[in-house]
Image: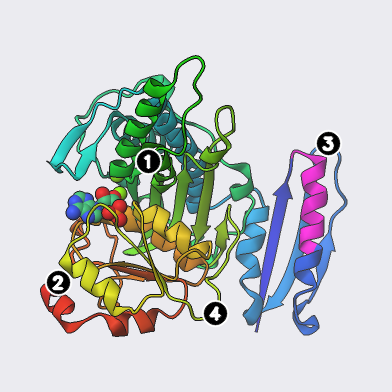
Amino acid sequence: MFLNVTNKVTLLLERQMTILIARINSLVQTFCTSCIQQIQFTPVVKAVKRISFSVSVCKYHVTLNSELSVMSGSPAVVMRLVASAYRVAEKAGAIVRRVLHSGELGIVEKTGANDLQTLADRLAQQSICASLSKRFPKITIIGEEDLPVEEVSGDLMETGQEEEILHKPCPAEYRELKEEEIVVWVDPLDGTKEYTEASMCLRRQTEARTPHNRPDTSKPHSTALWLLDNVTVLIGIAYGGRAIAGVINQPFYNYQLGEGAALGRTIWGMVGLGAFGFELQEVPGDRRIVTTTRSHSNKLVIDCVDAMEPHEVIRVGGAGNKIIQLVEGRASAYVFASIGCKKWDTCAPEAVLQAVGGKLTDIYGNAYRYDANVKHMNSTGVLATLRNHEYYTSRVPQSVLQALKSE
Ligand code: AMP
Ligand code: MG
Ligand code: MG
């Protein structure tokens, strides 16, 4: 059974044309020889820069169809969305840095002293939601912060798209997604508690500084600057109730380099495509390094972490930050046996983790859903791993499972 795939590609740049031809050639080499019926390249017409080709492939190679469509210059909606989310997250990261350096955080307590909102949370969310909904008006966007509906100032709008993402092949199953089928979960600033603590640390440093005195990094308050790495901006993309793509901006990445250094990085991933912007690493051997909350702990959290029989426990802020630790080989499992974490905390991290073969579930091992109408709270905890998920779910104590009863 053969499927005929014909594509016409119009390109504006000669360079892109060369890349495209190389790409087609390398794709063709991956087919079984029997499935290629014909490959025809029409001559390149200089003025229009147009190339046509026709390929016939067997049913096992129909995925080529989606690859060719990407190359034909019409990226799928979801790829355009991820490309926009990448730039939007970068802008939000810049806002988060700017507010920190202004020193005016405008802190508001939401449900209590460990549940805070700052000016950075508010501005970053406005920027993300307004920018994405302008370009993708039919997408459902759910942000963490409850903000009054108001006009967003022009300087908060981001219109760019990350070119490299537009050139990636969209996995076949997401190729035809429509805007109205997509839900975007936004955590404009994950790790707000740690952000406010790092800000206090910076303020003390500035106050302690005299013209002849460099900051004394041996003082305890100076060490709190590591908390800056706990902060992330999270944009998660869901379809059919599942997290399928995610963008994580870490605004203070490279903070150790000090004043004047270019700060920040953006990690992104898509299920079926892969994850980018970092080097995938695993914790060596069968060491169990558990990462968990530092500011929202309780007896259940501690009991559950202990039951994993970890060789080491790391207590840091932010769900995004903890997933970065998993994919960079600094932790083997993220264990949080408590309510508190919400869908906007886990959607982007789950997609990035899954894109590299990892898993994020509740402590029962059940997947969360990300449809527009789900409840926001992840009330049966979070368990995330790059490998050996079953080991960790099997170790959760009955008492903890009982206490966080699944609905
Ligand atoms: P943590 O690991 O404590 O930084 O938590 C990860 C995410 O879940 C952060 O966005 C927290 O704000 C949120 N979170 C976890 N527990 C709570 C809680 N008890 N109250 C409010 N937010 C929480
Ligand atoms: Mg959060
Ligand atoms: Mg937040």
Point out the stretch of residues depicted in magenta. 12-24
Of the 4 image quadrants, the one containing the N terminus is: bottom right
Q: Residues within 10 Å of mark 4 (few under 14, many from 20)?
A: few
Can you identify the residue that label 3 sits on? Answer: 47
The scheme the figure's colours follow is: rainbow
Q: Which mark is residue 220?
A: 1
Q: Amino acid at mark 4?
A: Gly
Label 1 crowd (10 A; few <14 / some 14-19 / many >=20):
few
Which residue is at 17% across, 78% downward?
401
Report how far apart the C-alphas of labels 1 and 2 lie in the structure.
Answer: 37 Å
Residue 151 % position (x, y):
29, 23
Counting residues from the N terminus, which is met first, the one under dot 1 or under dot 4? 1
Whole-percent x and y of residue 187? Answer: 33, 46
Residue under numbered circle 2:
404
- Which kind of residue does numbered mark 2 sit on? Leu
- Give above or below for 398 relative to 182: below
